């Protein structure tokens, strides 16, 4: 498999610290994003511990089990949280993929996102783990769950939570021409999917596209940290 990749991160215009981190390792075929949970101390440390744990799992093993690796990493973040913020702990989102042998293995916890631009369509590969989406799932089963404007975007799963997080895991066949996009919510809350699709379908290089996306998010206020990774599949 041959691919080109780029990553970008920016503190944005309103935050005092960049609590986002990204995974980008062409040699390992490892890409993704982590977003330290705002409102808690140690968000940057949580995201850093997350990406370090995932990377270490790939360096030490051949092709790790992504669910087990994600949960082991979550335990490491949980342990760090007991030191940094004993009353509440620390946490991070994590959305990452492993590209190998013409396949993508994708693991996801939280509200960062992964998309694919494939054959003219821009498709979400993940679903946000938020109170709003949980309520939607319950209502589809005939159950009721009240939510408020204040808590609708609150996370229902994260790395570093007590116990082991439930990890969304999927496998995809990778095809030539695919473009995979990983992003934290600082970008996807500023830019609609239709606008992202228009940029990512363009003729620019991955790095140029990410700069266009970052510039647009900053122009619209840059209210959060902004991080994204983009991969072009040149040969599956």
Image (cartoon, rainbow, N blue to C red):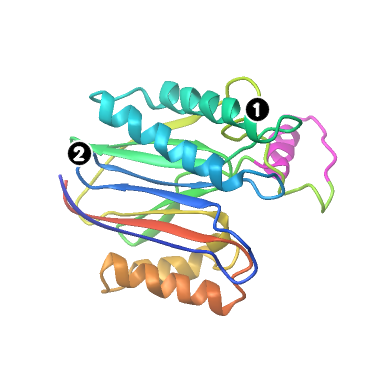
* 105 with respect to 165 (left or right): left
Q: Is residue 93 visible?
A: no
Say whether residue 124 is visible.
yes
185 lies above or below 145? below
**In front of the other: label 2 or label 1?**
1
Q: Residue at 61% x, 62% y: name it.
A: 224
Q: Nearer the viewer, residue 119 or 191?
A: 191
In the rendered structure, the answer to whether residue 219 lies left or right of residue 4 reads right
Between the residue at mark 2 and the residue at mark 1, the CA separation in whole angstroms equals: 40 Å
Residue at image position (36%, 22%) is 65
Front one among 159 and 43: 43
> Image point 26% across, 23% down: which residue?
61
- Decide: few, some or many residues near mark 2? Use Cα within 10 Å; few <14, some 14-19, many ≥20: some
Q: Where residue 198 sits: x, y (%)?
A: 41, 71
User: Would you say residue 132 sits in the magenta stretch?
Assistant: yes
| Earlier-in-chain disc, 2 versus 1 | 1
Instruction: Classify mark 2: helix, strand or loop.
Output: loop
Which residue was labeled with disc 1? 82
Which residue occupies the foreground of this view, 43 or 134? 43
Question: Residue 54's x, y, as percent?
Answer: 39, 33
**In the figure, residue 51 lies in which quadrant?**
top left
On residue 102, which mark appears?
A: 2
Which residue is farthest front? 83
Q: Is residue 7 left or right of residue 94?
A: left
Task: Kindly indicate the quadrant of the structure image that contains residue 7.
Answer: bottom left
Where 48 falls versus 205 (above or below)? above
Highlighted range, magenta: 130-147
Residue 133's tag is none
**Which residue is most to the bottom?**
219
Does 178 appear above or below 128?
Answer: below
Assess disc 1: are there few (<14), some (14-19) or many (≥20) residues with their C-alpha within 10 Å of its C-alpha: some
Label 1 element class: helix
């Amino acid at each position: 498999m041959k691919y080109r990749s780029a990553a970008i991160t920016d503190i944005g215009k309103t935050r005092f610290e960049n609590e986002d981190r990204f995974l980008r390792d062409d040699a390992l075929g490892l890409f993704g994003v982590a977003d330290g949970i705002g409102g808690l101390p140690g968000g940057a440390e949580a995201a850093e511990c997350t990406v370090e744990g995932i990377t270490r799992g790939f360096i030490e093993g051949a092709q790790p089990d992504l669910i087990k690796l994600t949960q082991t990493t979550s335990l490491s973040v949980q342990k760090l949280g007991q030191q940094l913020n004993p009353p509440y702990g620390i946490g991070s989102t994590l959305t990452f993929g492993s590209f190998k042998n013409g396949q993508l293995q994708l693991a996801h916890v939280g509200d960062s996102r992964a998309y694919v631009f494939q054959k003219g369509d821009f498709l979400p590969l993940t679903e946000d783990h938020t109170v709003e989406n949980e309520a939607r799932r319950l209502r589809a089963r005939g159950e009721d769950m009240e939510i408020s404007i204040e808590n609708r975007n609150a996370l229902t799963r994260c790395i570093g939570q007590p116990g082991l997080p439930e990890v969304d895991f999927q496998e995809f066949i990778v095809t030539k021409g695919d473009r995979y996009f990983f992003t934290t919510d600082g970008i996807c809350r500023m830019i609609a999917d239709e606008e992202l699709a228009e940029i990512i379908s363009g003729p620019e290089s991955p790095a140029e596209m990410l700069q266009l996306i970052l510039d647009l998010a900053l122009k619209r206020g840059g209210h959060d940290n902004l991080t994204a990774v983009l991969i072009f599949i040149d040969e599956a």
